[in-house]
Image: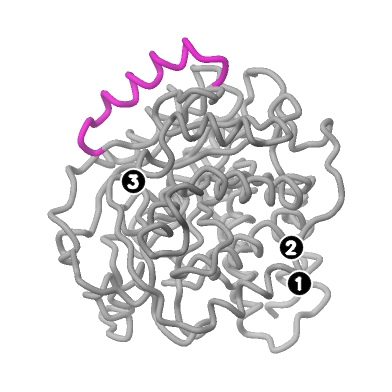
Amino acid sequence: MPAKFPESIQRKGPLRVSVQLKYITALVAFVCTLICFHETSADNGSSASVNNSASTPLVLSHYMPWYTAKPASDHWGWHWTMNHFDPEKQSDGKRQIASKYYPLIGPYDSGDPNVLEYHLLLMKLAGIDGVIVDWYGLTNFNDYAILHRNTTRMLQQCERLKMKFVICYEDQTIPALVKGNRLTPANRVSHAATEIKWLNKYWFQSPSYVRLHGKPVLLSFGHTGLTSDEWTECINELEFPIAYFSQDLRRKGALGGFGWPSPNAGMQQVDRFLAELAKWPHAIPAAFPRFDDIYLQAGVSKGYPQLADDDGATLETTLTKAIQSQASIIQIATWNDWGEGTQIEPSREHQYRDLRLIQKWCRKDNPKDNPKDEATRNSEFRMPGQILKLRQDKTQTPPELDQAVLELAAGNIEQARALLQTMQK
C-alpha cells in the first residue's frame, strides 16, 4: 500500500485504503452543499415507491462519485492516477489512467453536472431506473465533503430527469474518523444515527428517493464499519423506519442483504446469495459484467482474481438470475468503478454493449426480430454524448439543448434527435 495519496480513498469491493486530503477546498465544498437540502415531503405513492416483488423490478446502477479531473478541477484525483499513472501523458488518443478500460468520453470529473446528465440519459435509454450512490457522510474529513457535494449534484440531476436515487452508506468511514481523532469510539453508533437522521430530514424526502413499502431504502457497504449489533442499536435510535440492506448477508435489523461481485468466490457467490435471499423478507441481487482490477499494475496491491467478461455472458447470466429471483430491486454493480473494471458505462473497448444487453431485457426487444434495430439503438445511445459535446463546446446553453435533454429523458427520441440535428448544423 502506498504511504500517501493526494486524497482519501476507501475502495469499493475487496480493497479499502484511507489517506489524508490535502485540499482546503473541501470545507468550502461541504458548506456550499448544505444549501442544497430538500425540505418537501415525498408522497409514498410516488413513482419512486416500490411495494411488492414484481415481474418488472426497479433496476438501479451503483454509482461512484469519486472522480476528480481537469479541467473541472485543478488536479487529477487518485482514482484516475492511483499515484502511479499520469493522465497528462497521452498515447493513441488516450490519457494514461488507472484502469484497464477507457471511458468513451475520456476521464471525467464527478462534480461536473454535464457529465452527470450524460450518465443519467444513458441509463434512461438502457431502461435503468436510477442510481445507488456511494456516500461517505457529512464530516469534513479527508475528501468526504467533495464526495458529498458530488452526491448532492447527482440527486439534483435525478430530480430534474425524474430518475430514482438511493444512498449506500460507507460506514467504514466511522473507524477512519475514530483513527483520525474526529470521533470517539463511544460515539460510533450515535454518529451513524445522526447522519441517517440528516438523510431522513433532507434526501429521504426527495420525490426521487426510493421507498420500499413507504420506508426509505438505505444500504451499507462492507463489514469493517459498524458491527451487526451496532447497526441494530443505530436503527433503534431512529424515530422513523428505514428499509435497511447490508452487504451479502442479512444483519440483525436489516430487511435483507444486497449482492456484490466477489472475485475470490467467483460466480459461486452469486448462487450462494440467491439461495440465501429466499429466507429473507427482501433482497437486492446484483448483476455485473466482470471484475478486472488495475491494482497490481498500479502498485496498490497484488490485485484480485479476474471474473471474466466472457463477451458479455457474465452480465447476461447475472442479470437473468437476478430477474428470476423476482426481487423488487436489482442493482447493477457497477456503473463506473473503472479501477476494478466492473463498469457498464460505455468504454472504448465495449462501446454500448453492456447497456444494450440491459436494454434488451428492459425494453423486451430482440434484434433478431429487426436486423436494423442494433444500428438504431446505437444511434440513440450516441445522443447523450452529442449533448455533452454541445454543452462543452458552447459558452451559453441554447434553450433548444435543454429541451432536447428533457425530450430524451421523457422517451421522445425523435423529437430530441430533431433538436440536436438543428443545433449541429
- In the rendered image, which residue does mark 1 sit on? 401
- In the rendered image, which residue does mark 3 sit on? 13
Closest to the camera, between mark 3 and mark 2, is: 3
**Residue 402 falls inside the magenta stretch:** no
**Residue 266 falls inside the magenta stretch:** yes
For the point 24% across and 39% down, the residue is 263
Dot 3: what SS? Answer: loop
The reply to whether the C-beta atoms of the residues labelled 2 and 1 are less than 8 Å apart is yes
Tag 3 or tag 1, which sits nearer the N-term?
A: 3
Screen quadrant of the N terminus: bottom left
The amino acid beneath tag 3 is Gly
Depth order, front residue of 420/342: 342
Q: Position of residue 3 (x, y in %)?
A: 20, 72
Q: Is residue 282 above or below residue 420?
A: above
Q: Is residue 366 visible?
A: no
Dot 2: what SS? Answer: helix
Label 1 – label 3 distance at C-alpha: 38 Å
The boundaries of the magenta stretch are 263-282
Q: How is the image coloured?
A: one colour
Q: Relative to 283, is 203 on the left or the right?
A: right
Q: Position of residue 173 (x, y in %)?
A: 43, 54
Q: Is residue 329 above or below residue 188?
A: above
For the point 73% across and 33% down, the residue is 240
Q: Which mark is residue 208?
A: none
- In the rendered image, which residue does mark 2 sit on? 405
Label 2 – label 1 distance at C-alpha: 6 Å
Label 3 – label 2 distance at C-alpha: 33 Å
Q: Is residue 327 above or below residue 382?
A: above
Q: Position of residue 60 (x, y in %)?
A: 57, 40
Dot 1: what SS? Answer: helix
